[in-house]
Image (tube, rainbow, N blue to C red):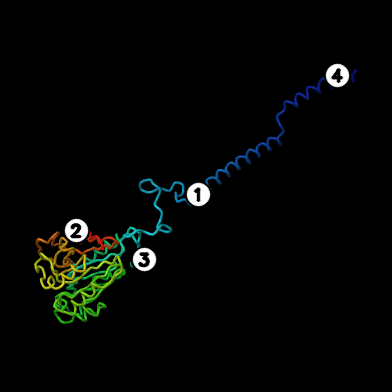
Amino acid sequence: MTGDIGTRFDAVARPVLRDEEANRPPRRRNAVDHEVMTRRRTLVAVLVVLVLVTVATVWALATGLGAPGRPAGDDGARPAPSAVGTAPPTAGTVPSAGPTGPRSPSAPEARIAVAGDTGTGDQEIRETVDAMVAREDRQGPYDALVLLGDIVYDDGDASQVDERVTDPFAPVLDTGAELVPVLGNHDVASGEQNQILADLGRSRGWYVQEVGRVRIVVLDSNRVDDAGQTRWLEKTLAADVPPGTWTVVALHHPPFSAGEHGSDMAVREEWVPLFEKFGVPLVLAGHDHDYQRSRPIDGVTYVVSGGAAKLRPTGREDFTEVSTSTRHFLDLAVYGDRLVGRAVDQSGRVLDEFTIPGP
């Protein structure tokens, strides 16, 4: 009897146990396997995203679009490519090696600072030099510094060259500007003008200084009656020069001036016909302590820039375009197709701006 009961219990219980096993949750090992597979799939997805981002970033940098998040140009457009590897610039934007190396394509080929009647050595001339330096900081260093005479007041004492010239203008000269001195009437008063020139690296009062594609023809207007100088001038102006060369004349006594001294008629009679004959576009002078610009006279523009330190009243004549009694210097920017002149006062304000096309 006992055996029958055990047999019945076993027969009934086994199906129940099978049902319980069928309804049990999966074993722990299967759960672990599922979790591992899920993590692997997530990791693969993350790696795929990282690879896609990396490829996109490399492609963007290679095509010049910039890295993700990097701002575009000011107008939201793609930034312009650099000059490296681009086509050669056109005339007027040719990079030129200046005192500190090549300039950008949009910069002038050469920059020349011009000042006249500078030889006081006082605070006024130093403030004019400060204005030059401030403009250099914004625009770049000057390639040349032209001083239009009366560089050693009052009577051309050669022992004062450092005090009146090299020391005040050291901030400009030390950046690589070539000094181009012109003799004025005060510089020859003592008879020591040859020593002044020698101290400044010149052997005589008339010479040519090349600054890039500009040739600055320097004259000694104290000796306008020197036939040898006039023959030299004519030969120099008539000489063949490379295409695109600018010729700028620098002297002390102005042939056209509405200032206190007025026009120097000897210079006008002796040299102006040569300026006109050979197509000189620009003549720079000092002597009158002001700033003046003429209208073009037979193709020549005459600028008086003698107000770097001392000032005197000025007026107007029928040839006058601009006339002002203001301390200043002249900033001359040289491009392949134009000269741009700006008279700048001691505060940095532009008093006058003009453009001469050519050459």
User: Is residue 81 at least partly visible in the picture?
Assistant: yes
> What is the crowding at mark 3: few (fewer than 14 residues within 10 Å), some, or many (at least 20)?
few
Which amino acid, by three-letter code, is at mark 4? Arg
Give the SS element for disc 2. Answer: strand
Precedes in sequence: disc 1 or disc 3:
1
Point out residue 111 in the picture as x, y percentages from the top left corner: 28, 64
> What is the crowding at mark 1: few (fewer than 14 residues within 10 Å), some, or many (at least 20)?
some
The Cα–Cα distance between marks 1 and 2, rounded to whole angstroms, is 50 Å
Given this view, does label 1 or label 4 mark the residue nearer the observer? 1
> What is the crowding at mark 4: few (fewer than 14 residues within 10 Å), some, or many (at least 20)?
few
Which amino acid, by three-letter code, is at mark 1? Trp
Nearest the viewer among 220 and 1 is 220
Precedes in sequence: disc 2 or disc 4:
4
Residue 206 lies in quadrant: bottom left
Which quadrant of the figure contains the C terminus? bottom left
Residue 5 lies in quadrant: top right
Read off the residue under disc 3.
Answer: 101
Say which mark, if any, is on residue 59.
1
Which amino acid, by three-letter code, is at mark 2? Asp
The Cα–Cα distance between marks 3 and 2, rounded to whole angstroms, is 29 Å
In the rendered image, the vertical position of residue 213 relative to residue 191, given as above or below: above
User: Is residue 123 at least partly visible in the picture?
Assistant: no
Read off the residue under disc 4.
Answer: 8
